[in-house]
Structures are given as structure tokens and as C-alpha cells.
Image: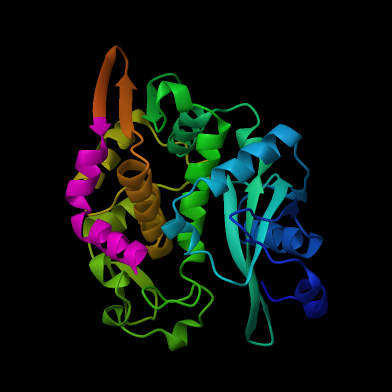
Amino acid sequence: MNTSDPAGWVRRPRAVSRGAVVVEACPEELVQHIRLCNQATGQKAAPRAASASAEFLRDLQAAFETLPAAVQRLVPADFFGVYLARGLGCSAVVDVVRYQGRTLGSALVIDVDALAMRDANAWASWKESEPFTDDGTLEIRLTIAHAGEDDRRTALQFILLHEIGHLAVCGRRFLPEWWMAPANLGTSQDYAFLDFSWEVDAGKSIAPRSTSVAEMRRTVSFYCDAGLSAETAVGLYGGLLDSDFPTLYAIANAYEDFSECLALYVHTRLLRRPYRLELQLGDETYLVDDPDSVAARCMAKFSFVESLLAS
């Protein structure tokens, strides 16, 4: 986001101190920017600033404070904090605030309504089901929490892991910064993570190397009322298992790919939490994915994440 009020942003408090994080209602300028982005991509969601209950705020702070220290270190020093909104059109977004070519800071916006009535497994299943039609022929169940941890805090922590993956791009060179002008992009070999599955094509766009993944990208879309059928779901997940991508969400772009790899690596390996994806078609239930399957097909990417966290 390019701001028209740099002084106002410079005066805002910075976020992370002693493991805690600043949490505030989303500034109106950022709300309007997200609204324009939604309109540009055909989303109907109209975001607005929000507050949250004391219980929600406690869950959010606890989710952040109990992240591994290596993950917290990925948050940029200029991070403004977590802002609250409603009607984002997704669970959370990250952006940077810039003025005259200079980055003033970064921010994470969470939609409080996305978790209003959902614990961790319900939220994860809802998100995974989002591209598919709700006609009773398909049920997607994604388990990311053990019974004793199936709560909002665990859901918030998973969201934070993913969004910190986006924040980690700021000031590092394993991916091009997403606000970079396409003309300034190097080759895929210039960016360590990009080179696993992506390339910079002749038109200076970042595209998947795999033609089958490129076809999947043209089919699946989150948060855009795709309404895909159960038969399509079976084909998409089959294609996912034959790829080196961790989730369907990861095929959207290189930034989602990295963020999903970071989130799943930390979630399953460091926090020792489950990841079990099941499809129910009629009376039949199929196990689609689990931590071992994800780790096997994403071995090189997980090794990269491990090295990044150790650095």
C-alpha cells in the first residue's frame, strides 16, 4: 500500500516487545486499500475496521507468544502489528506500507468473524472447502488440532504461522518482494525458494514450472465463489499429491507456497500437531494427506525452511 499519510504511520506504535504484539483496529487507509484490492480481483467482500472481545485478544496474544522463538525472529523489525477487521474476504492478509519508494513498515490484518464461531478444525475444514460447491456430495475434513487443542487459539496460531511466512519475505532475498515492479525481477535462480517450483517467464511473470500445476491454478480459486464439483476435487487432490506443493492453497503463487511450507513445517514438526485431510464422497471416506505425505513431496522446501529458521 502506498500511503498518503506517512507521518501518521511513522507515529504508530511498533509491534513486538517481550514476545507480545500490538493489536488494534485496522487503520482506515489500510481498510480502503484492501477494499480496492478486493474490487480489482472480483471479490465482493467490503472490509471495515473491527474490535474484538477480551477473550479473542487473549487467544491472539497467547497464539503469538507461544510461537517458537525462531518463527518470531522472522517478523520484521518495522512490523506495525496485528490489525482487526471484518469482511476481509479471507481469514487474514499481510501488506507493507510504502511512501515514495520507501517501506515504512508491514502489517497483518485478521478477520475476527472468520473465527467467531469456529475452532481450529472447523476453521481449517471451512477454508479447505472454500473452492468447492456445498451441494451435499462432498465433505472435506481437515484436522490441525488434537482434541485438547481444538480451539480458537490453535486456529489463530496456524493463521499467524502462514502470515509470518509473508512477512518473512520483507528484506530477504529468497523470494522477490511482492511489491517489486515486474521489470526488476531477476531469474528464478536469483531467489532460493522460487527456484524450487517457479520460474520468471519471458513476460516477467512468476509462473509454476509444472504444466499440470499451471492447469490446476486455472481451475481452483479460493474466496471467489468457484463452486467446483466433487469430481473436480478428486482430480485436484490427485494432482497435488503428484506435485511438490504442500496444499492446494500453495499453488496460487510462490508466496503462498512458501507460507504454507513454513506453516506446515512448524505446525507438524516443531509443534507436533496433526495435519489430516479427508474427503467424504457419499458413504466413502478417503485419507488424502497427512504430515508424512506432505513432508515427502516437499522435502527440499522443508529443508529450506529448516535452514531459514536455524539462521
Residue 244 in the image: state x and y as whole percent.
Answer: 22, 54
Relative to 248, say whether 58 is above or below.
above
Asked if the stretch drawn in magenta spans residue 305, the answer is yes
How many badges with numbers are in the image? 0
Quadrant of the rendered image containing residue 288: top left
Asked if the stretch drawn in magenta spans residue 284, the answer is no
Question: In screen coordinates, is 108 left or right of 218?
Answer: right
Relative to 297, say whether 72 is above or below.
below
Can residue 220 be seen at all in this image of the molecule? yes
Q: Nearest the camera: 258 or 222? A: 258
Q: Nearest the camera: 17 or 152? A: 17
Q: What is the span of residues highlighted in magenta in the rendered image?
A: 288-311
Can residue 219 be seen at all in this image of the molecule? no
Q: Nearest the camera: 128 or 14? A: 14
In the picture as drawn, the residue positioned furthest to the front comes out as: 18
Residue 285 in the image: state x and y as whole percent.
Answer: 27, 19
Residue 208 in the image: state x and y as whole percent.
Answer: 29, 65
Question: In screen coordinates, is 184 left or right of 278?
Answer: right
User: Image quadrant for the C terminus?
Assistant: bottom left
Residue 55 in the image: state x and y as whole percent.
Answer: 70, 32
Relative to 8, say whether 84 is above or below.
above
Quadrant of the rendered image containing residue 111: top right
Magenta stretch: helix, strand or loop mostly = helix
User: Image quadrant for the N terminus?
Assistant: bottom right
Q: Nearest the camera: 294 or 281? A: 294
Quadrant of the rendered image containing residue 70: bottom left
Question: In screen coordinates, is 167 left or right of 194?
Answer: right
| Residue at 39% over, 75% down | 205
| Residue at 26% over, 39% down | 291
Coloration of the structure image: rainbow
